[in-house]
Amino acid sequence: MNRKPIEEQIEGIAHLLSHLTGEVNALEKSYSGVLRVLHKLEASLDYDDLTGLLRRNSFFRKYEKLMEECRTLGESLGVLMIDIDYFKVLNDQHGHPTGDEVIRKVAELLKQFESPNCMSGRYGGEEFVVAMRGTDAEMLGVAEFIRRGAERLHGPVMDSQGKPQANVEWKCTLSVGVASSNKEGFDATRLIKVADEALYQAKKSGRNCVKAA
């Protein structure tokens, strides 16, 4: 019996299998690379480019998840609505580069309070939102710490090219409205609405203050 043709066939099959294995490995690496890129892209879409805080829709997804955890565990959840006082005046007087810098600095302040029990997001423009697990006293305490922290914020006014001007500084204050699930229940939309109404009362009361619903 001539074994050579059989050996040649086996060798050919082995070569083909080796080639296919290489292609499968290459596809797996390519697939893993695509997944990594998609995960990074997904993560980047969650966060606001200017502030690094959660975008509004991303914040609401995480906020509702935190609310469900608090409801299940019988814990309290609070919402803080925060607005930079007289931001339009500041923006009009000193320009958008300075306005953007003020927003960034306020965002950095809010990040100091972030934890598994506290998250912050950019609600829109110069308005921010914080959701936190804790007692009513803790919510008011964090709100007041944020307000006082903003009073210490300052920085150089930027020119139209985004460069700091000598001897010209900006300062800012915040108004904060607070709502708690203890009073309003576990309704995500209502908590935001009531906190926003409390924020309006803070503005009516002269700004740079905290008002609880």
Image (tube, rainbow, N blue to C red):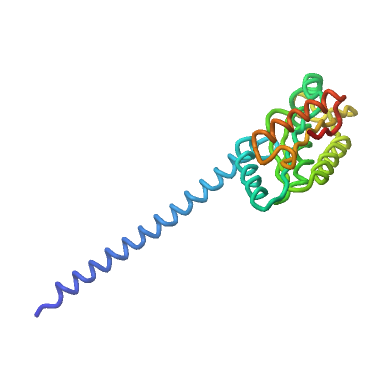
The answer to whether residue 200 is left or right of residue 192 is right
Instruction: In the rendered view, tell whether residue 195 sits above or below residue 115.
Output: above
Instruction: In the rendered view, tell whether residue 22 sits above or below residue 76.
Output: below
- Say which quarter of the image contains residue 211: top right
Residue positioned 71% across, 50% down in the render = 75
| Quarter occupied by the N terminus | bottom left
- Say which quarter of the image contains residue 164: top right
Instruction: In the rendered view, tell whether residue 175 sits above or below residue 1.
Output: above
Residue positioned 14% across, 78% down in the render = 3
As rendered, which of 135 and 113 lies closer to the eye? Answer: 135
The answer to whether residue 127 is left or right of residue 41 is right
As rendered, which of 190 and 161 lies closer to the eye? Answer: 190
Residue 46 at what x, y percent from top left?
60, 41
| Quarter occupied by the C terminus | top right
Instruction: In the rendered view, tell whether residue 206 sits above or below residue 58.
Output: above
Residue 144 at what x, y percent from top left?
85, 39
Residue positioned 65% across, 45% down in the render = 67
Residue 68 at what x, y percent from top left?
63, 47
Residue positioned 77% across, 33% down in the render = 82
